[in-house]
Amino acid sequence: MKLAPASIPYRVFQKAGRVAISLVFLGSIGTEFAIGRELVIAGVGVIILLTAGYELAYYRRFRYEFTKDTFDVKSGVLNRREREIPYGRIQNVDISRNVIQRLLGLSAVNLETAGGGSTEAAIKYVTAEAATGIQSELRERKSTRGDREPAEGADTDEATKKQTAAEDELLFEIAPSELALAGVLSFDPRVPGLLFAIFTGSIPFVSPVIPQTDSPAVLLGVGVVFLIALVVLSWLVGAASAIVNYWGFRLTRSPTELRYERGLLKQYSGTIPFDKIQTVTISDNPLKRQTGYATLAVETAGYAPGQANERGSEAAVPIASRDRIKRLAEEIDGCETVSFNRPPKRIRRRYFARYLIGLAVLTGVLYGIGQLLAAETFSWYLPLAGLVLAPIAAHYKWLHRGYALGEDHLITRNGVWRRETKRVAYHRIQTVIDERTIFQRRWSVATVVADTAGSLSLLGNDAAAVDIDASDAIYLRRVLRTRLQAALAERRQQRNSVPAAASTPTPDSETLADDNEAAIGDETE
Protein backbone atom coordinates (compact mmCIF):
# COMPACT_ATOMS: atom_id res chain seq x y z
CA MET A 1 0.00 0.00 0.00
CA LYS A 2 1.20 3.48 -0.90
CA LEU A 3 0.92 7.06 0.22
CA ALA A 4 -1.81 9.36 -1.07
CA PRO A 5 -0.88 11.02 -4.42
CA ALA A 6 -1.80 14.41 -2.92
CA SER A 7 1.07 13.96 -0.47
CA ILE A 8 3.58 14.79 -3.25
CA PRO A 9 2.59 18.46 -3.80
CA TYR A 10 1.98 18.94 -0.09
CA ARG A 11 5.43 17.67 0.89
CA VAL A 12 7.00 19.76 -1.89
CA PHE A 13 5.24 22.87 -0.61
CA GLN A 14 6.18 21.99 2.98
CA LYS A 15 9.91 21.47 2.36
CA ALA A 16 10.60 23.85 -0.51
CA GLY A 17 8.61 26.60 1.18
CA ARG A 18 10.79 26.51 4.29
CA VAL A 19 14.00 26.59 2.25
CA ALA A 20 12.74 29.38 -0.01
CA ILE A 21 11.70 31.53 2.96
CA SER A 22 15.11 31.00 4.54
CA LEU A 23 16.83 32.01 1.30
CA VAL A 24 14.80 35.22 1.05
CA PHE A 25 15.37 35.95 4.73
CA LEU A 26 19.13 35.48 4.53
CA GLY A 27 19.34 37.50 1.35
CA SER A 28 17.68 40.49 3.02
CA ILE A 29 19.97 40.72 6.07
CA GLY A 30 22.45 43.52 5.46
CA THR A 31 23.31 45.12 2.14
CA GLU A 32 26.60 43.24 1.92
CA PHE A 33 24.66 39.95 1.77
CA ALA A 34 21.86 41.22 -0.50
CA ILE A 35 20.87 38.90 -3.34
CA GLY A 36 19.33 40.12 -6.55
CA ARG A 37 15.63 39.49 -7.19
CA GLU A 38 16.33 37.40 -10.29
CA LEU A 39 18.85 35.24 -8.43
CA VAL A 40 16.39 34.67 -5.58
CA ILE A 41 13.62 33.67 -8.02
CA ALA A 42 15.98 31.32 -9.84
CA GLY A 43 17.14 29.77 -6.57
CA VAL A 44 13.56 29.21 -5.43
CA GLY A 45 12.71 27.59 -8.77
CA VAL A 46 15.68 25.23 -8.55
CA ILE A 47 14.76 24.30 -5.00
CA ILE A 48 11.16 23.52 -6.01
CA LEU A 49 12.29 21.34 -8.93
CA LEU A 50 14.81 19.40 -6.87
CA THR A 51 12.34 18.92 -4.04
CA ALA A 52 9.61 17.78 -6.45
CA GLY A 53 11.95 15.19 -7.97
CA TYR A 54 12.96 13.89 -4.56
CA GLU A 55 9.38 13.70 -3.28
CA LEU A 56 8.23 11.85 -6.39
CA ALA A 57 10.99 9.27 -5.82
CA TYR A 58 10.04 9.10 -2.13
CA TYR A 59 6.40 8.47 -3.06
CA ARG A 60 7.32 5.67 -5.46
CA ARG A 61 9.60 4.04 -2.89
CA PHE A 62 7.36 4.26 0.19
CA ARG A 63 5.35 1.12 0.98
CA TYR A 64 3.56 -0.18 4.07
CA GLU A 65 2.07 -3.63 4.51
CA PHE A 66 0.24 -5.73 7.10
CA THR A 67 1.77 -9.20 7.45
CA LYS A 68 0.74 -11.98 9.81
CA ASP A 69 3.04 -10.89 12.66
CA THR A 70 4.45 -7.47 11.74
CA PHE A 71 3.65 -4.12 10.22
CA ASP A 72 6.29 -3.51 7.52
CA VAL A 73 7.37 -0.11 6.24
CA LYS A 74 9.78 0.50 3.36
CA SER A 75 10.99 4.04 2.74
CA GLY A 76 13.94 6.19 1.71
CA VAL A 77 15.47 7.41 -1.53
CA LEU A 78 19.20 7.76 -0.99
CA ASN A 79 19.24 6.00 2.36
CA ARG A 80 16.73 3.17 2.10
CA ARG A 81 15.17 1.69 5.21
CA GLU A 82 12.98 -1.34 5.87
CA ARG A 83 11.27 -1.82 9.24
CA GLU A 84 9.33 -4.79 10.53
CA ILE A 85 7.39 -3.77 13.63
CA PRO A 86 5.77 -6.60 15.65
CA TYR A 87 2.17 -5.81 16.52
CA GLY A 88 2.77 -6.55 20.20
CA ARG A 89 5.49 -3.89 20.37
CA ILE A 90 3.33 -1.05 19.09
CA GLN A 91 2.47 1.31 21.94
CA ASN A 92 0.53 4.14 20.33
CA VAL A 93 -0.97 4.89 16.93
CA ASP A 94 -1.62 8.62 16.55
CA ILE A 95 -3.33 10.45 13.69
CA SER A 96 -2.87 14.19 13.15
CA ARG A 97 -4.36 16.59 10.58
CA ASN A 98 -3.75 20.32 10.31
CA VAL A 99 -5.97 22.73 8.42
CA ILE A 100 -4.21 22.38 5.05
CA GLN A 101 -4.03 18.61 5.38
CA ARG A 102 -7.77 18.45 6.05
CA LEU A 103 -8.46 20.55 2.95
CA LEU A 104 -6.37 18.11 0.90
CA GLY A 105 -7.86 15.05 2.62
CA LEU A 106 -4.50 14.00 4.10
CA SER A 107 -3.49 12.62 7.50
CA ALA A 108 -0.21 11.75 9.22
CA VAL A 109 0.09 8.48 11.14
CA ASN A 110 2.77 8.05 13.83
CA LEU A 111 3.61 4.69 15.38
CA GLU A 112 5.36 4.59 18.75
CA THR A 113 7.05 1.54 20.24
CA ALA A 114 8.51 0.77 23.65
CA GLY A 115 11.98 1.96 24.59
CA GLY A 116 12.28 5.05 22.45
CA GLY A 117 11.61 8.75 22.60
CA SER A 118 11.25 9.10 18.84
CA THR A 119 8.65 7.93 16.34
CA GLU A 120 9.31 4.39 15.14
CA ALA A 121 7.41 4.86 11.87
CA ALA A 122 5.79 7.96 10.39
CA ILE A 123 3.44 7.60 7.43
CA LYS A 124 3.21 11.04 5.81
CA TYR A 125 0.72 11.25 4.24
CA VAL A 126 -2.29 9.02 3.51
CA THR A 127 -5.96 9.78 3.01
CA ALA A 128 -8.12 10.32 6.10
CA GLU A 129 -9.94 7.04 5.42
CA ALA A 130 -6.67 5.13 5.08
CA ALA A 131 -5.31 6.65 8.31
CA THR A 132 -8.40 5.55 10.24
CA GLY A 133 -8.10 2.15 8.58
CA ILE A 134 -4.45 1.76 9.63
CA GLN A 135 -5.31 2.69 13.20
CA SER A 136 -8.26 0.28 13.33
CA GLU A 137 -6.34 -2.52 11.65
CA LEU A 138 -3.40 -2.23 14.04
CA ARG A 139 -5.78 -2.06 16.96
CA GLU A 140 -7.50 -5.26 15.85
CA ARG A 141 -4.25 -7.10 15.14
CA LYS A 142 -2.79 -6.10 18.51
CA SER A 143 -5.84 -7.52 20.28
CA THR A 144 -5.86 -10.74 18.21
CA ARG A 145 -2.05 -11.04 18.18
CA GLY A 146 -1.99 -10.71 14.39
CA ASP A 147 -3.47 -14.15 13.72
CA ARG A 148 -5.73 -12.96 10.91
CA GLU A 149 -5.00 -13.15 7.22
CA PRO A 150 -3.22 -10.10 5.78
CA ALA A 151 -5.70 -7.39 4.85
CA GLU A 152 -6.22 -6.40 1.24
CA GLY A 153 -6.23 -2.72 2.20
CA ALA A 154 -6.02 -0.40 5.13
CA ASP A 155 -9.56 0.92 4.87
CA THR A 156 -12.30 -0.41 7.10
CA ASP A 157 -15.94 -0.43 6.05
CA GLU A 158 -18.49 1.85 7.65
CA ALA A 159 -20.18 -0.97 9.55
CA THR A 160 -16.91 -1.94 11.24
CA LYS A 161 -16.27 1.68 12.25
CA LYS A 162 -19.76 2.00 13.73
CA GLN A 163 -19.35 -1.27 15.61
CA THR A 164 -16.01 -0.16 17.03
CA ALA A 165 -17.44 3.19 18.08
CA ALA A 166 -20.42 1.50 19.71
CA GLU A 167 -18.12 -0.76 21.75
CA ASP A 168 -16.14 2.19 23.16
CA GLU A 169 -17.30 3.65 26.46
CA LEU A 170 -17.21 7.44 26.73
CA LEU A 171 -15.16 8.39 29.79
CA PHE A 172 -14.80 12.12 29.30
CA GLU A 173 -15.94 14.84 26.90
CA ILE A 174 -14.84 18.38 27.56
CA ALA A 175 -17.67 20.83 28.15
CA PRO A 176 -17.61 24.42 26.81
CA SER A 177 -17.23 25.75 30.36
CA GLU A 178 -14.29 23.42 31.01
CA LEU A 179 -12.68 24.43 27.71
CA ALA A 180 -13.01 28.10 28.63
CA LEU A 181 -11.58 27.40 32.07
CA ALA A 182 -8.62 25.56 30.52
CA GLY A 183 -7.88 28.74 28.58
CA VAL A 184 -8.27 31.03 31.59
CA LEU A 185 -5.87 28.90 33.67
CA SER A 186 -3.23 28.59 30.93
CA PHE A 187 0.04 30.48 30.60
CA ASP A 188 2.52 30.28 27.71
CA PRO A 189 6.16 30.42 28.97
CA ARG A 190 7.47 31.02 25.43
CA VAL A 191 6.21 34.61 25.37
CA PRO A 192 8.80 35.98 27.84
CA GLY A 193 11.62 34.56 25.73
CA LEU A 194 10.15 36.06 22.56
CA LEU A 195 9.79 39.50 24.14
CA PHE A 196 13.34 39.30 25.46
CA ALA A 197 14.60 38.50 21.96
CA ILE A 198 12.63 41.47 20.53
CA PHE A 199 13.85 44.00 23.08
CA THR A 200 17.47 42.87 22.84
CA GLY A 201 17.47 43.23 19.05
CA SER A 202 17.97 39.52 18.42
CA ILE A 203 15.22 39.46 15.78
CA PRO A 204 16.05 41.32 12.53
CA PHE A 205 13.71 44.01 11.19
CA VAL A 206 12.20 44.52 14.68
CA SER A 207 13.40 47.64 16.48
CA PRO A 208 11.42 48.30 19.65
CA VAL A 209 11.16 51.87 20.83
CA ILE A 210 12.93 52.22 24.18
CA PRO A 211 12.96 55.64 25.84
CA GLN A 212 16.44 57.08 26.23
CA THR A 213 16.44 58.61 29.69
CA ASP A 214 18.32 58.46 32.97
CA SER A 215 15.23 59.18 35.06
CA PRO A 216 14.63 56.31 37.54
CA ALA A 217 10.89 57.09 37.55
CA VAL A 218 10.63 56.71 33.77
CA LEU A 219 12.66 53.51 33.79
CA LEU A 220 10.52 52.13 36.59
CA GLY A 221 7.36 53.02 34.67
CA VAL A 222 8.70 51.29 31.54
CA GLY A 223 9.54 48.24 33.62
CA VAL A 224 6.05 48.07 35.11
CA VAL A 225 4.40 48.44 31.69
CA PHE A 226 6.68 45.74 30.27
CA LEU A 227 5.87 43.39 33.15
CA ILE A 228 2.11 43.90 32.71
CA ALA A 229 2.40 43.36 28.96
CA LEU A 230 4.43 40.23 29.60
CA VAL A 231 1.81 38.72 31.89
CA VAL A 232 -1.14 39.69 29.68
CA LEU A 233 0.43 38.43 26.45
CA SER A 234 1.59 35.19 28.09
CA TRP A 235 -1.93 34.60 29.37
CA LEU A 236 -3.60 35.46 26.03
CA VAL A 237 -1.27 33.19 24.04
CA GLY A 238 -1.62 30.39 26.58
CA ALA A 239 -5.41 30.70 26.59
CA ALA A 240 -5.63 30.63 22.79
CA SER A 241 -3.26 27.68 22.61
CA ALA A 242 -5.21 25.69 25.21
CA ILE A 243 -8.56 26.31 23.50
CA VAL A 244 -7.18 25.39 20.06
CA ASN A 245 -5.42 22.25 21.36
CA TYR A 246 -8.24 20.89 23.53
CA TRP A 247 -11.17 21.76 21.25
CA GLY A 248 -13.55 18.80 21.01
CA PHE A 249 -11.57 16.66 23.46
CA ARG A 250 -13.05 13.18 23.97
CA LEU A 251 -11.67 10.19 25.88
CA THR A 252 -13.22 6.75 25.34
CA ARG A 253 -12.36 3.29 26.59
CA SER A 254 -12.37 -0.06 24.86
CA PRO A 255 -11.56 -3.39 26.55
CA THR A 256 -7.84 -2.98 25.74
CA GLU A 257 -7.05 0.74 25.43
CA LEU A 258 -7.99 4.38 25.82
CA ARG A 259 -8.79 6.45 22.73
CA TYR A 260 -8.68 10.25 22.50
CA GLU A 261 -9.62 12.95 19.99
CA ARG A 262 -8.83 16.65 20.20
CA GLY A 263 -7.82 19.76 18.25
CA LEU A 264 -9.32 22.64 16.28
CA LEU A 265 -6.68 23.76 13.79
CA LYS A 266 -4.70 20.54 14.04
CA GLN A 267 -6.72 17.47 14.93
CA TYR A 268 -5.31 14.50 16.79
CA SER A 269 -6.64 11.05 17.51
CA GLY A 270 -4.76 8.18 19.07
CA THR A 271 -4.69 5.28 21.48
CA ILE A 272 -3.22 4.57 24.91
CA PRO A 273 -3.04 0.78 25.55
CA PHE A 274 -3.92 -0.25 29.11
CA ASP A 275 -1.14 -2.84 29.30
CA LYS A 276 1.46 -0.18 28.38
CA ILE A 277 0.47 2.41 30.99
CA GLN A 278 3.39 3.14 33.33
CA THR A 279 2.31 6.16 35.37
CA VAL A 280 -0.93 8.07 35.92
CA THR A 281 -0.43 11.66 37.13
CA ILE A 282 -2.93 14.12 38.63
CA SER A 283 -1.56 17.68 38.53
CA ASP A 284 -2.87 21.04 39.68
CA ASN A 285 -1.71 24.49 40.78
CA PRO A 286 -2.89 26.87 43.53
CA LEU A 287 -5.55 28.43 41.30
CA LYS A 288 -6.89 25.04 40.19
CA ARG A 289 -6.91 23.81 43.78
CA GLN A 290 -8.92 26.82 44.91
CA THR A 291 -11.46 26.29 42.13
CA GLY A 292 -11.55 22.50 42.59
CA TYR A 293 -10.04 21.48 39.22
CA ALA A 294 -7.13 19.29 38.12
CA THR A 295 -5.47 17.66 35.09
CA LEU A 296 -4.92 13.96 34.38
CA ALA A 297 -1.93 12.72 32.36
CA VAL A 298 -1.01 9.19 31.28
CA GLU A 299 2.48 7.95 30.46
CA THR A 300 3.17 4.73 28.55
CA ALA A 301 6.41 2.84 27.97
CA GLY A 302 8.69 4.85 25.72
CA TYR A 303 6.08 7.50 25.06
CA ALA A 304 4.15 10.09 27.01
CA PRO A 305 1.24 12.07 25.66
CA GLY A 306 2.37 15.52 26.45
CA GLN A 307 5.83 15.57 24.99
CA ALA A 308 6.63 18.80 23.21
CA ASN A 309 6.80 17.27 19.75
CA GLU A 310 3.18 17.54 18.63
CA ARG A 311 2.46 13.91 19.40
CA GLY A 312 -0.18 12.49 21.61
CA SER A 313 -2.99 13.93 23.63
CA GLU A 314 -0.90 16.33 25.76
CA ALA A 315 -3.03 15.14 28.67
CA ALA A 316 -5.41 12.28 29.11
CA VAL A 317 -7.88 14.85 30.50
CA PRO A 318 -6.88 18.54 30.13
CA ILE A 319 -9.10 19.86 32.95
CA ALA A 320 -12.05 18.68 35.03
CA SER A 321 -13.30 18.80 38.59
CA ARG A 322 -10.92 17.15 41.03
CA ASP A 323 -13.48 14.54 42.12
CA ARG A 324 -14.13 13.64 38.50
CA ILE A 325 -10.39 13.38 37.82
CA LYS A 326 -9.93 11.03 40.78
CA ARG A 327 -12.75 8.79 39.57
CA LEU A 328 -11.26 8.67 36.07
CA ALA A 329 -7.82 7.81 37.47
CA GLU A 330 -9.32 4.97 39.49
CA GLU A 331 -11.16 3.68 36.40
CA ILE A 332 -8.02 3.81 34.27
CA ASP A 333 -5.49 2.17 36.61
CA GLY A 334 -7.66 0.82 39.44
CA CYS A 335 -5.76 2.76 42.08
CA GLU A 336 -7.41 3.12 45.46
CA THR A 337 -7.75 6.29 47.57
CA VAL A 338 -5.06 6.56 50.26
CA SER A 339 -3.72 8.91 52.92
CA PHE A 340 -0.16 10.23 52.55
CA ASN A 341 2.84 9.86 54.83
CA ARG A 342 4.58 13.25 54.93
CA PRO A 343 8.29 13.96 55.45
CA PRO A 344 9.40 14.59 59.07
CA LYS A 345 8.34 17.99 60.41
CA ARG A 346 11.95 19.01 61.04
CA ILE A 347 12.51 19.19 57.29
CA ARG A 348 10.50 22.42 57.24
CA ARG A 349 13.52 24.14 58.81
CA ARG A 350 15.62 22.99 55.89
CA TYR A 351 13.15 24.44 53.39
CA PHE A 352 13.05 27.69 55.37
CA ALA A 353 16.87 27.90 55.30
CA ARG A 354 16.88 27.36 51.54
CA TYR A 355 14.40 30.19 51.04
CA LEU A 356 16.51 32.47 53.22
CA ILE A 357 19.59 31.72 51.14
CA GLY A 358 17.65 32.48 47.96
CA LEU A 359 16.38 35.81 49.33
CA ALA A 360 19.88 36.75 50.46
CA VAL A 361 21.36 36.03 47.04
CA LEU A 362 18.63 38.01 45.25
CA THR A 363 19.02 40.96 47.63
CA GLY A 364 22.78 40.94 47.11
CA VAL A 365 22.40 40.92 43.32
CA LEU A 366 19.97 43.84 43.39
CA TYR A 367 22.23 45.76 45.77
CA GLY A 368 25.13 45.25 43.38
CA ILE A 369 23.04 46.50 40.45
CA GLY A 370 22.03 49.58 42.46
CA GLN A 371 25.63 50.37 43.25
CA LEU A 372 26.63 49.85 39.62
CA LEU A 373 23.93 52.24 38.38
CA ALA A 374 24.58 54.67 41.24
CA ALA A 375 20.83 54.95 41.76
CA GLU A 376 20.14 56.32 45.22
CA THR A 377 16.41 55.50 45.05
CA PHE A 378 16.94 51.93 43.85
CA SER A 379 14.87 49.64 46.13
CA TRP A 380 17.34 46.77 46.40
CA TYR A 381 15.92 45.71 49.81
CA LEU A 382 12.43 44.78 48.54
CA PRO A 383 13.16 40.99 48.42
CA LEU A 384 13.65 41.09 52.21
CA ALA A 385 9.87 41.33 52.47
CA GLY A 386 9.92 37.65 51.58
CA LEU A 387 11.19 36.91 55.10
CA VAL A 388 7.58 37.07 56.24
CA LEU A 389 6.44 34.58 53.58
CA ALA A 390 9.41 32.18 53.81
CA PRO A 391 8.14 30.16 56.82
CA ILE A 392 4.68 29.90 55.23
CA ALA A 393 6.20 28.69 51.95
CA ALA A 394 8.35 26.15 53.81
CA HIS A 395 5.29 24.79 55.62
CA TYR A 396 3.26 24.39 52.41
CA LYS A 397 6.16 22.72 50.65
CA TRP A 398 6.25 20.14 53.44
CA LEU A 399 2.47 19.87 53.48
CA HIS A 400 2.21 18.97 49.78
CA ARG A 401 4.85 16.24 49.86
CA GLY A 402 4.30 12.61 50.77
CA TYR A 403 3.94 9.00 49.69
CA ALA A 404 1.55 6.12 50.25
CA LEU A 405 1.67 2.36 49.75
CA GLY A 406 -1.59 1.15 48.27
CA GLU A 407 -2.60 -2.43 47.73
CA ASP A 408 -1.36 -2.45 44.13
CA HIS A 409 0.26 0.99 43.65
CA LEU A 410 2.89 3.36 44.96
CA ILE A 411 1.48 6.89 45.15
CA THR A 412 3.68 9.96 45.57
CA ARG A 413 2.90 13.68 45.79
CA ASN A 414 5.21 16.67 45.28
CA GLY A 415 5.04 20.37 44.42
CA VAL A 416 3.19 23.50 45.49
CA TRP A 417 2.97 25.68 42.37
CA ARG A 418 2.61 22.54 40.27
CA ARG A 419 1.53 19.69 42.51
CA GLU A 420 1.75 16.23 40.96
CA THR A 421 0.26 13.06 42.41
CA LYS A 422 1.76 10.03 40.64
CA ARG A 423 0.39 6.49 40.71
CA VAL A 424 2.66 3.59 39.73
CA ALA A 425 1.59 -0.06 39.77
CA TYR A 426 4.15 -2.21 41.57
CA HIS A 427 4.70 -4.51 38.60
CA ARG A 428 5.70 -1.47 36.47
CA ILE A 429 8.67 -0.53 38.67
CA GLN A 430 12.04 -1.11 37.00
CA THR A 431 14.48 0.23 39.57
CA VAL A 432 14.26 1.53 43.13
CA ILE A 433 16.77 4.34 43.66
CA ASP A 434 17.82 5.70 47.06
CA GLU A 435 19.23 9.23 46.65
CA ARG A 436 20.90 11.13 49.50
CA THR A 437 22.72 14.39 48.88
CA ILE A 438 25.27 15.73 51.35
CA PHE A 439 22.62 18.09 52.74
CA GLN A 440 20.04 15.31 53.06
CA ARG A 441 22.54 13.18 54.98
CA ARG A 442 23.00 16.00 57.48
CA TRP A 443 19.24 16.02 58.09
CA SER A 444 19.00 12.18 58.09
CA VAL A 445 16.55 12.13 55.19
CA ALA A 446 16.55 10.52 51.74
CA THR A 447 14.66 10.44 48.45
CA VAL A 448 13.36 7.10 47.12
CA VAL A 449 12.61 7.06 43.37
CA ALA A 450 10.52 4.38 41.65
CA ASP A 451 11.87 4.31 38.10
CA THR A 452 9.64 2.97 35.32
CA ALA A 453 10.05 2.30 31.62
CA GLY A 454 8.30 5.55 30.69
CA SER A 455 10.11 8.13 28.56
CA LEU A 456 9.61 10.89 31.14
CA SER A 457 11.92 8.92 33.41
CA LEU A 458 14.81 10.28 31.37
CA LEU A 459 13.80 13.77 32.51
CA GLY A 460 13.82 12.89 36.20
CA ASN A 461 10.04 12.96 36.43
CA ASP A 462 9.53 9.60 38.13
CA ALA A 463 7.41 8.94 41.18
CA ALA A 464 9.56 9.95 44.16
CA ALA A 465 9.16 10.01 47.93
CA VAL A 466 11.21 13.14 48.67
CA ASP A 467 12.95 14.01 51.96
CA ILE A 468 11.52 11.11 53.94
CA ASP A 469 13.22 9.88 57.10
CA ALA A 470 16.25 7.66 56.46
CA SER A 471 14.69 4.73 58.34
CA ASP A 472 11.47 5.15 56.32
CA ALA A 473 13.51 5.11 53.11
CA ILE A 474 15.03 1.74 54.03
CA TYR A 475 11.57 0.38 54.85
CA LEU A 476 10.08 1.76 51.62
CA ARG A 477 12.81 0.21 49.48
CA ARG A 478 12.29 -3.19 51.10
CA VAL A 479 8.50 -3.05 50.72
CA LEU A 480 8.69 -1.96 47.06
CA ARG A 481 10.99 -4.85 46.20
CA THR A 482 8.77 -7.34 48.03
CA ARG A 483 5.54 -6.11 46.45
CA LEU A 484 7.14 -5.96 43.03
CA GLN A 485 8.13 -9.61 43.21
CA ALA A 486 4.67 -10.55 44.49
CA ALA A 487 2.95 -8.57 41.70
CA LEU A 488 5.14 -10.17 39.02
CA ALA A 489 4.49 -13.65 40.42
CA GLU A 490 0.74 -13.00 40.41
CA ARG A 491 0.80 -11.78 36.80
CA ARG A 492 2.90 -14.76 35.75
CA GLN A 493 0.42 -17.10 37.41
CA GLN A 494 -2.50 -15.40 35.66
CA ARG A 495 -0.73 -15.66 32.32
CA ASN A 496 0.05 -19.34 32.78
CA SER A 497 -3.56 -20.08 33.77
CA VAL A 498 -4.80 -18.93 30.35
CA PRO A 499 -5.17 -21.93 28.00
CA ALA A 500 -2.55 -21.93 25.29
CA ALA A 501 -5.19 -22.32 22.60
CA ALA A 502 -6.96 -19.18 23.74
CA SER A 503 -3.92 -16.96 23.78
CA THR A 504 -0.93 -16.67 21.50
CA PRO A 505 1.31 -14.23 23.34
CA THR A 506 3.71 -12.03 21.50
CA PRO A 507 7.35 -11.68 22.63
CA ASP A 508 6.26 -8.51 24.44
CA SER A 509 3.70 -10.25 26.65
CA GLU A 510 5.84 -13.36 27.10
CA THR A 511 8.77 -11.48 28.53
CA LEU A 512 7.01 -8.66 30.38
CA ALA A 513 7.32 -10.12 33.85
CA ASP A 514 10.74 -11.65 33.23
CA ASP A 515 12.13 -8.38 31.86
CA ASN A 516 10.84 -6.43 34.86
CA GLU A 517 12.21 -9.01 37.28
CA ALA A 518 15.61 -8.92 35.59
CA ALA A 519 15.66 -5.14 35.36
CA ILE A 520 14.66 -4.38 38.93
CA GLY A 521 17.51 -3.06 40.98
CA ASP A 522 18.16 -1.26 44.22
CA GLU A 523 20.50 1.67 43.71
CA THR A 524 21.87 3.98 46.34
CA GLU A 525 23.47 7.31 45.54
Image (tube, rainbow, N blue to C red):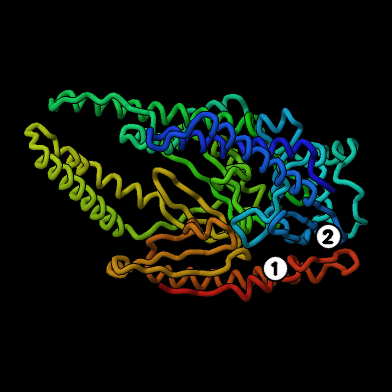
The image quadrant of residue 203 is: top left
Looking at the image, residue 7 sits to the left or right of residue 436; the answer is right
Residue 416 visible in the displayed image: yes
Looking at the image, residue 492 sits to the left or right of residue 233; the answer is right
Image coordinates of residue 4 in percent, x first then y, are 79, 40
Identify which amino acid the numbered label 1 is placed on.
Leu
Residue at 31 percent of width and 36 percent of height: 200
Image coordinates of residue 260 in percent, x first then y, are 69, 40
Looking at the image, residue 25 sits to the left or right of residue 46; the answer is left
Residue at 90 percent of width and 37 percent of height: 159
90 and 152: which one is in front? 152
84 and 363: which one is in front? 84
The answer to whether residue 234 is above or below residue 144 is above
Residue 145 has which mark?
A: 2
Neighbourhood count class around disc 1 (C-alpha, 10 Å): few under 14, some 14–19, many 20 upward: some
Identify which amino acid the numbered label 2 is placed on.
Arg
Discs 2/1, front: 2
Residue at 54 percent of width and 74 percent of height: 521
Residue 211 has which mark?
A: none
Residues under labels 2 and 1: Cα distance? 15 Å
Between discs 2 and 1, the one toward the N terminus: 2
Q: Quadrant of the C terminus?
A: bottom left
Image coordinates of residue 89 in percent, x first then y, are 73, 61
Q: Secondary structure at mark 2?
A: loop
Q: Which residue is mark 1?
A: 512
Residue 315 visible in the displayed image: no
